[in-house]
Image (cartoon, helix red, strand yellow):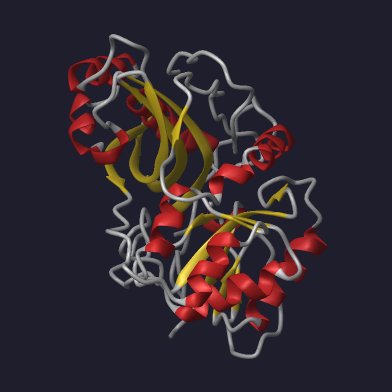
Amino acid sequence: MTRKPGHPSRRAVLLGATGGLVGVAACSGGSSHTAPSQSTTARSGAASAASGSDTASPPTTQAATLPRTTPWRPTSAEITPAAKLRAVQVVEAIGAWPEGKAGAAAAKARVAALRLPTGLVDEAGPLLPDADAAALQVVDAQYGGILTDSASVLVVCRQWTRRAGTVSAGGTTVDVRLTRAASGWTVTALHPARPGAAASALPVRAREVLSDSRVELPPAAQADLRSGRVHDSVLAALLRLAGSYRMYVSVVRSGHPLDVFGTSRPSDHPLGRAFDVWQIDGHAVVDPATSRSLIERFMRDAAAAGSYNVGGPVLLSGGAAANQFFSDDTHHDHVHIGFDR
């Protein structure tokens, strides 16, 4: 999410060994920490292990066995982890099912078991494809925005579906909207990414980013680049930063709120003029063990690559323009890099 001075702004993980399907299990902020469950270090390592397929071509056909996945759970380092947990739970429930539990009716039963509105299934879109069985792995859950009583959590996921004995790989990013009441956080809406059709011809830089092993892209972000609707400034910055860092991108254009959360001001993301990074050189931004100097250096290098709007967990001084850097609760878990053209 983009943020300009005076406005609120807006943040793991992968798969294990191949095996049978495991059961199913974008702003200023509040706080409510819970005890850690799955460590950020473990999530980061798992994400790195799966990085090869994240930069591959569009959904591919594989052997008939669905991969083994693990539930994503927030750690105590998160800002309001309970909101993230609720968002991830509904995505995991809708997007994964065993043989014999396909379809909207079964998905609604899984959502009802979470004590969430079953109407959310009707908003699932690509998260609920026509398939006999499916496995889903959440890569990251970052804030699209966090206010006292409302939030946007961007759940980045990969998904494998089996149909007629054939497994295909894909995935999406879901902008999960939540509100908080006395009883806790509840999910009010789902907005899955809709990157659009692939362009017939891609700019050279887009092809270079897609083939760069140091730029790890989840499925929706890959599709954004293939759509040809990502600005050259973003592509150039990705390539420049890849010269010094290995980055795991969470969100580029689709799957992000249209407006800066809590405002009526358009976000740079849907315009194809921003990207978010949740992991740098194998270290999750949200992890307290991640070197602050690494994050600071990355943010300054992003500004040097042309970004007018760099946000993260560290508030930096200086910059070529006033307020070029910012920090808030939303950006506690990722670095936002935006461009004005």
Q: In this view, does 8 lie above or below 153?
A: below
* Image location (x, y in percent) of residue 317: 71, 79
* Image location (x, y in percent) of residue 306: 59, 84
- Toward which corner of the image does residue 95 lie, by quadrant? top left
Residue at 24%, 15% (x, y): give it.
Answer: 106
Left or right for 277, reference 299: left
Quadrant housing the N terminus: bottom left
Residue at 32%, 57% (x, y): give it.
Answer: 195
Q: In this view, does 146 lie above or below 115?
A: below
Along the line of sight, which residue is nearer the eye, 165 or 79?
165
- Toward which corner of the image does residue 126 lie, by quadrant? top left
Q: In this view, does 214 lie above or below 284?
A: below
Left or right for 239, reference 134: right
* Image location (x, y in percent) of residue 272: 39, 71
Quadrant housing the C terminus: bottom left
Left or right for 178, reference 19: left
Residue at 64%, 22% (x, y): give it.
Answer: 17
Residue at 50%, 65% (x, y): give it.
Answer: 275
